[in-house]
Image (cartoon, rainbow, N blue to C red):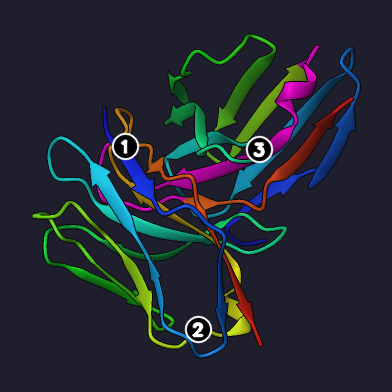
Amino acid sequence: GDSVTQMEGPVTLSEEAFLTINCTYTATGYPSLFWYVQYPGEGLQLLLKATKADDKGSNKGFEATYRKETTSFHLEKGSVQVSDSAVYFCALSGGSQGNLIFGKGTKLSVKP
Amino acid sequence: ETGVTQTPRHLVMGMTNKKSLKCEQHLGHNAMYWYKQSAKKPLELMFVYSLEERVENNSVPSRFSPECPNSSHLFLHLHTLQPEDSALYLCASSQDPRARGLEQYFGPGTRLTVT
């Protein structure tokens, strides 16, 4: 079945460092891809999405490009801030009832 | 209120108790979902309701019983839970579950502890 694999964390960076969180997927058909972020004590918030191959989603300085040839959707940010500390989830729209299928999440800690 | 709200935010219950979790969405969506989030595991889909009809239950134990009285409200009734049921329970909604590519909007979750 459809699945998402993302890099294990935790990831610890200094402020203004470059961030990459890897995400690869397995899916039949052409899913949409998402990145969600979960701040401490909160639910998941949509960060960005891409609906077809070569689409780039972007928001708040984060970017991810839908790469069909490598089945990847890696999250990047050029300069992280302390406020970016959170858990990041990669997901695809592959569920049989329209539900999302999530990766295990990657915890990011940014130090001042 | 805007978005998706959940109450209570925290719940501690004994294994013989009966309690209910409530979710309300103010987005005019047609589908609502319950997910379970446990440490070190991916989010697990528990139930899906589309236009107030259950369409997925994913082999969830019968000690979890959902109810969707209308498209804006979703409940999860709990009874005789086990300690391994302790987790964050997340509610989500989306506009149309069969239209691929649509994102889901999540509530803040209920942190459940079973003692």
The subunit carrying tag 1 is A
Of the numbered discs in the image, which one, if any, rests on residue A80? Answer: 2
Q: Residue A26 lies in what quarter of the image?
A: top left
* Amino acid, disc 3: Tyr
Residue B67 in view of the camera = yes
Label 1: few (<14), some (14–19) or many (≥20) C-alpha neighbours in 10 Å: some
Chain letter of the residue beneath label 2 in the structure image: A
Q: Was residue B69 drawn as part of the magenta stretch in this picture?
A: no
Which residues are the magenta region? B79-104
Q: Position of residue A75 (x, y in %)?
A: 35, 68
- In the rendered image, the vertical position of residue B7 relative to residue A110, given as above or below: above
Is B5 rendered above or below residue B89?
Answer: below
Residue that mark 1 sits on? A3
Q: Position of residue B71 (x, y in %)?
A: 51, 37
The quadrant of the picture occupied by the C terminus of chain B is top right
- Label for residue B50? none
Residue displayed at 23% across by 56% down: A72
Percent across and percent down for residue A5 are: 35, 45
Callout 1 secondary element: strand
Which secondary structure, mark 3? strand
CA gap between label 3 and label 2 equals 29 Å
Q: Which residue is mark 3?
A: B89
Work out how far the residue at label 1 is from the one at label 3, CA to CA, in angstroms: 21 Å
**Chain holding disc 3:** B
Residue B96 visible in rendering = no
Residue at 52% x, 38% y is: B43
Left or right, B50 with respect to A24, comes to: right
For the residue pair A73 and B106, the one nearer the viewer reads as: A73
Residue type pointed to by label 2: Val
Which residue does the image show at 16% across and 67% down from the upper left? A55
